[in-house]
Image (cartoon, rainbow, N blue to C red):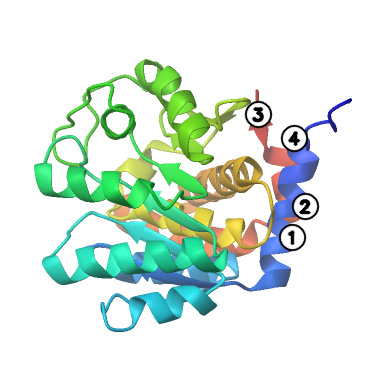
Amino acid sequence: MRRAPAEPVDARAVAAAREALTGAAPLVQCITNSVVQTITANALLAAGAAPAMVDNPHEAAAFAAVASAVLVNVGTPTDDTARAMRLAAAAAAQHGTPWVLDPVAVGALGFRTRLAGELLEHRPAVVRGNASEVLALAGAGGGGREVDSTAAREDAAEAAGALGMSTGAAVAVPGDVDVVTDGTRTVRVSGGDPLLTRTTGAGCALGAVSAATTAAVVLPLLAAVAAHVHVGLAAEVAAEVCGGPGSFAIAWLDALDAVGPDAVRAGARLA
């Protein structure tokens, strides 16, 4: 029996995903770290989604069942938020809600490493982590210095593919060129600006935009690639007009709103 051709992940498809996100206006539940809640919420609003910071363990599961998508970011876990993460991920899996795991500093600290391993059992649509975090999640070593990666991106490419195959997720590893893979296909996304790395919460906000995009398109690989293209192009626009890291953050939020499907189609640099 002949297999259906794989859905393309190219500039046209990425532009269509950007348009679908705007049209869907998804409601994204964010259980994220306390440092980045404001920029995460603002990035979602700018991208065309609606944020809901529902991280109470008494409410997390019920909200995940009705949300369009869920973001779980383990950056500053407490006992209560860890419980909320477990409940939300389980409810999302049960109700077919796509969810994204951002395994901040997994591999470096034991509590969150064990927590992320438990969360993986609920099969996220997208995992977005640096090389060290992905290596640790895949059981291939790792051990970053806090939120920074101590491993090269390409060191994690094979582990990312294995993680994608075992979980069904698209796994995104950022770098000078971002690598996004589901274990079957790998897409490299060029673009962005170094000022993203000097903006607190930009990477966490990318996880949220990825979650929003999973609510608008079916294929997790396309959702993750589209989010990376959108965020990277917005960074390039912001870098042209800002005076430094402070004004960059504001200009970047403006650009997340301004960069639409036509800009995405013209600017996407994929390999």
CB-based contact (under 8 Å), mark 1 and mark 2: yes
Q: Can you give x and y, in whole percent of width and height, for residue 235 in the image?
A: 49, 47
Residue type pointed to by label 3: Leu
Q: Do the CB atoms of the residues marked 2 and 3 lie less than 8 Å apart?
A: no
The answer to whether residue 34 is visible is no
For residue 17, side relative to residue 227 (left or right) = right
On screen, residue 105 versus residue 122, left or right, reads: left
Q: CA distance from mark 3 to mark 1?
A: 18 Å
Kindly identify which numbered label has been placed on residue 10.
Answer: 4
84, above or below 178, in the image: below
Q: Could you tell me how far apart the alpha carbons at marks 1 and 2 are, in whole angstroms?
A: 5 Å
Dot placed on the residue nearer the N-terminal end, 2 or 4? 4
Q: Which mark, residue 16?
A: 2
Is the residue marked by circle 4 packed among few (<14), some (14-19), or many (20+) residues within 10 Å? Answer: some
Circle 3 sits on which residue? 270
Q: Tell me the residue at 45%/25% (across/down).
A: 162
Residue lying at the far front of the rendered structure? 1
Q: Which residue is mark 1?
A: 19
Q: Position of residue 20 (x, y in %)?
A: 73, 62
Residue 73: mark: none
**Residue type, label 2:** Ala
Query: Which element type, helix, strand or loop, lies under badge 2?
Result: helix
Q: Earlier in the sequence, mark 3 or mark 4?
A: 4
Kind of residue sitting beneath label 1: Glu
